[in-house]
Image (cartoon, rainbow, N blue to C red):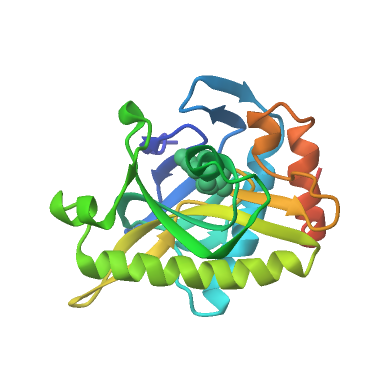
Amino acid sequence: MARRRLVYEGKAKILYEGPEPGTLVQYFKDDATAGNGEKHAVIEGKGVLNNRISEHIMSALNGIGVQTHFIRRINMREQLIRAVEMIPIEIVVRNVAAGSLSKRLGIEEGEPLPRPIIEFYLKDDKLGDPMVTEEHILAFNWATQQDVDDMISLALRVNDFLSGLFMGVGIKLVDFKIECGRIWEGDYQRVIVADEISPDSCRLWDARSGQKLDKDVFRRDLGNVTDAYAEVARRLGIMPEA
Ligand code: C5P
């Protein structure tokens, strides 16, 4: 049997060539990194949980007409996705002050923001993913004005939908990051949600206690990471097979 072709390996995921043209297989590793790779650990079961949680969220988004790259889950660690042309920008949406925003602007973590705030970061490991503005994105041609408008509109729709989804299970969506890619539909280009949406890329706090159920548990050594992610899966009604 021929070994399938590796297309890309990142810190937490691997992409393989898919079974049909225009598809890829996204494999979720157990690796966790923080501080741009300075801190690294293998957290048993994290990949399985993120595969399931991302599947749940992306399918729900597909269901409400927010197009994502997700096609279907293949097994515990893999999902079939559409191949897209990735836009090298991370879009962060914030509802509550936390993390780098709190640090940069001196706003206490947990302070609700007056409105959702969108930020852009350039995907560049060597530079540590610096924050950039729309001006930079357009001037350096990382994306077009249409791409930027589409990314903002997708990010806000994802925020509205996910805030409600999580609030329904007693979790506050503090902030999250998405990545987008372009697909072609005949002569038209469309921007869709790609990568993953999971506790690795969101800040999720228990609505009552404020307990952190996301990657900050790893970043800040706050306890058992798998337990926190499993709690998110449990509340979403997804119990991964053992
Ligand atoms: O660190 P910061 O406060 O800027 O992170 C904002 C949000 O974006 C958090 O939910 C974090 O998990 C996510 N993020 C990410 N990948 C990065 C940077 C941030 O998923 N490279």
Question: Which residue is situated farthest in the right direction here?
Answer: 209
The structure residue drawn at horizontal position 37% and vertical position 31%, both measured from the top left corner, is 128
From the viewer's perspective, is residue 122 above or below residue 152?
above
From the viewer's perspective, is residue 68 above or below residue 130?
below
Drawn side of residue 124 relative to residue 3, left or right: left
Quarter assignment of residue 193? bottom left
Drawn side of residue 133 relative to residue 98, left or right: left
Drawn side of residue 68 relative to residue 30, left or right: left
Q: Position of residue 91 (x, y in %)?
A: 42, 54
Quarter assignment of residue 180? bottom left
Q: Is residue 20 visible to us here?
A: no
The structure residue drawn at horizontal position 35% and vertical position 56%, both measured from the top left corner, is 83
Q: Position of residue 116 (x, y in %)?
A: 52, 65
From the viewer's perspective, is residue 106 above or below residue 235?
above
Numbered label tally: 0
Q: Position of residue 37 (x, y in %)?
A: 48, 24
Residue 237 vs residue 117, the one in the foreground: 117
Q: Quadrant of the C terminus?
A: top right
Q: Position of residue 225 (x, y in %)?
A: 74, 34
The structure residue drawn at horizontal position 50% and vertical position 20%, both measured from the top left corner, is 38
Residue 27 vs residue 191, the one in the foreground: 191
